[in-house]
Amino acid sequence: MTVHSAHPPGFAHQFEDMQQQREAGSLGMWVFLLTEIMFFGGLFAGYIIYRALYLPAFEIGSHLLEVQFGALNTAVLILSSLTMALAIHSAQVGKRRAQVWFLITTMILGAAFLAIKFTFEWHHDYVEHLVPGFGFIIRPEWGAAGQHVPMFFCFYFFMTGLHAIHMIIGIGLLTVLTVMAHRGRFAPEYYAPLEVSGLYWHFVDIIWIFLFPLLYLIGGRYIGGGH
Amino acid sequence: MSDHVVPVKLYIGIFVALLCLTALTTGVAYIDLGAFNTVAALAIAVVKMLLVVLFFMHVKYSGRLIQVFILAGVLFLAILVTFTLADELTRHWSPTPTGWGMIVPLLSRFF
């Protein structure tokens, strides 16, 4: 049996060394994220097929979303990914206070994303009768394509809703990490919880990077707000 | 995960690039490029994804095993989308529902 003269904090004995432990932890997280790709992938595949089948209805639906809020939220999420990466960087160079502040900033940005999504967008859609199952009104100016517009909004609410659930879970993870960072649990030799949670947070960001153009942009914005 | 410490300047550079690409994809959506609008939007999204995966998620500095796993995930997503589309878009012989009305007689057979 190998005797570890230097025993780094957080080292689990089944691993040869810290390098192997890190790789195993990251690989495990990536395997989970691959199942998440397939989880969201089902919705993306469904979206692609129904968009191909009912393109005019999807363009009408996309037009009804407010692109400035989608773009603003993209910027908010990208900034939160930066602060998450910087929190991990602070752990790597052993700055405890910076870790805590970057984690808190990431949480605030995540909450800001959800606040914009729920108050400015979802609430607005509800008032405008654009939520299927909650008094959706098919407008006469949509013409023959109108009957399929609720399909677009089903995809919109399920995709952004599933994404929002992931954001809420991410904020929960960040709360735990902030407490751990505050107690000085992370060191340059050991910061695995930060690293794998960071992978999750960036993954959720990537989902939004695809949702933004798919839902808000590729509905022929250049036509003008004629619908 | 790797021991490689990415410099803060590089992180900020990636962040600025991501913001510029977001502005670009929003701007391009307002220009009529025909079918190329969709291609441009998805191409920019893929570039943004690569920046996040390679630098924020440290995959550029990860071991080969993790990189191969990620490629496998992308491959399976491609199989899911391509094969579903190949089936759906070549099925001109199957009826497409014209509205939710036809669901009702279908359901009433069971309930």
Image (cartoon, grey):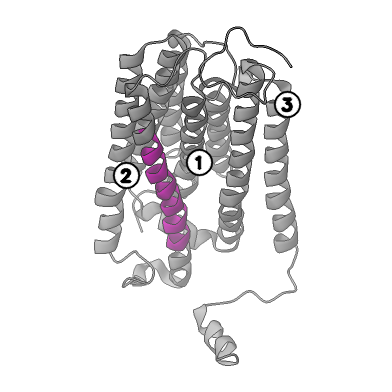
Circles 3 and 1 on the same subunit: no
Residue A135 percent location from the top left of the image: 31, 73
Would you name the residue on which mark 2 appears?
Answer: A114
Measuring 46% from the left and 34% from the top, which residue is drawn there?
A201
Q: What label does residue A207 carry, if any?
A: 1
Q: For the residues carrying marks 3 and 1, which lies nearer the camera in this image?
A: 3
Q: Which residues are magenta?
A: A152-174
Q: Which residue is mark 3?
A: B65
A142 to A215, vertically: above or below: below
Whether residue A225 appears in magenta in the rendering, the answer is no
Amino acid carrying mark 3 in the image:
Leu
Is disc 1 in contact with disc 2, using a CB cutoff of under 8 Å?
no
Q: Give residue A222's mark.
A: none
The residue lying at 28 percent from left, 44 percent from top is A116
Q: Which of the 4 image quarters holds residue A2?
A: top right
- Give the label, 2 or 3, closer to the camera: 3
Q: Are the residues under marks 2 and 3 on the same chain?
A: no
Residue A154 on the magenta span: yes
On the image, which quarter does residue A175 sit in?
A: top left
Query: Disc 1 marks which amino acid?
Result: Ile
